[in-house]
Image: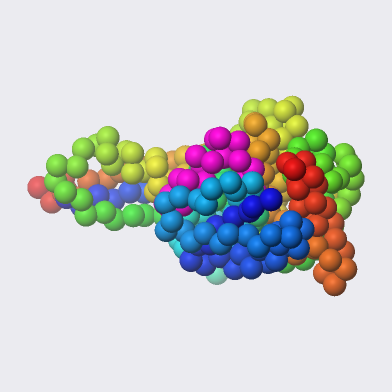
Amino acid sequence: MKLRIIVTLKNGVLDPQGKAIQHALAGLGFGGVQDVRAGKIFELDVADDTSDSAVDEMCRKLLANTVIENYRVERAQESQG
Amino acid sequence: MKTAVIVFPGSNCDRDIAVALEDVTGVKPHMVWHGEASLPDGIGLIALPGGFSYGDYLRCGAIAARSPVVRAVIAAAERGVPVLGICNGFQILTETGLLPGALMRNEGLDFVCRDVALTVGNSQSIFTSGYRADEQITIPVAHHDGNYFTDADTLDRLEDEGRVAFRYAESVNGSARGIAGLLNAQGNVLGMMPHPERRIEAAHGGSDGRRLFEGLLEAVA
């Protein structure tokens, strides 16, 4: 089973990296980019019987730092039908 | 006093802290590799050194915080053994949860490597008894991710409880409330971004860092 875990900074947490990217985009002539938030994507290939709670624990214990980051899990298999 | 320095792949201040500890205590520290499951007996201080443990993969300190030896460090900290985390060591301590909050990319995005002025926020702890409250000292920093963040309620609580050991006396990295060094609630764990081990003798340009180690030795002796 393939999982995609998306980790982003929480709202209200300043993202200097995102700000720098936003300025770079403006410098390239892309006006109207109001905000950029940088994040991370993890692609996991896990055993089919991996429980939701186990995946949630992976996120909380390691993949995301929940002091500053949110995470969401997407299951790639669902879209494959 | 017997001391231990934890060494991770990518640590690069382990030798500096070992020299500082040996100089002040007169005893060579135990260098403990990250894969060890336990610490030597009778350790009076555990140091988590600066550097780039595990290449800063995932987040600074994140992998080190889950390493076998750090489980032993957490257990020791919970028994009251003093733990000092410097720079990457501070990042590791926040990742373990022994200290609250997180250290994020510097506000200006630059790696900051220079002497900075600090104000001593709390001179009552075992780590800061060598200083006077509100005294200004100079200690170098060298980091890319020292921008301390936590929510406003936690910041208020940390300040009320006197847990801000050191504060930047100038603009450095965007750290919330200028926090440069933080104590745990019990006062036996200190995390700080500045490097006291790089300021222990006249050849370093001063010895404000040395007083941390001397004060600690006196406080726990």
Q: Position of residue B103 (x, y in %)?
A: 60, 49
* Residue plotted at (65% across, 62% down): B28
Name the chief secondary structure element in magenta: helix
Q: Position of residue B187 (x, y in %)?
A: 68, 35
* Above/below status of A63 relative to B99: below
Foreground: B97 or A15?
Answer: B97
Residue B206 shown left or right of residue B24 in the figure: right
Residue B57 found in image quarter: bottom left
Residue A62 shown left or right of residue B1 in the figure: left
Spot the residue most to the left: A81
Residue A50 found in image quarter: top left
* Above/below status of B28 relative to B150: below
Foreground: B66 or A56?
Answer: B66
Colour setup of the view: rainbow
Q: What's the magenta region?
A: B65-84
Residue A6 shown left or right of residue A19 in the figure: left
Q: Position of residue B10 (x, y in %)?
A: 52, 67
Foreground: B116 or A26?
Answer: B116
Spot the residue most to the bottom: B203
Q: Is residue B67 magenta?
A: yes
Is residue A13 visible in the rendered image? The answer is: no
* Residue plotted at (20% across, 50% down): A46
* Residue plotted at (60% across, 48% down): B43
Q: How many marks?
A: 0
Is residue B39 visible in the rendered image? The answer is: yes
Q: Which quadrant would the C terminus of chain B be assigned to in this image?
A: top right
Q: Is residue A78 magenta?
A: no
* Residue plotted at (9% across, 47% down): A81
Residue B157 found in image quarter: top right
Q: Position of residue B186 (x, y in %)?
A: 65, 31
Foreground: B49 or A24?
Answer: B49
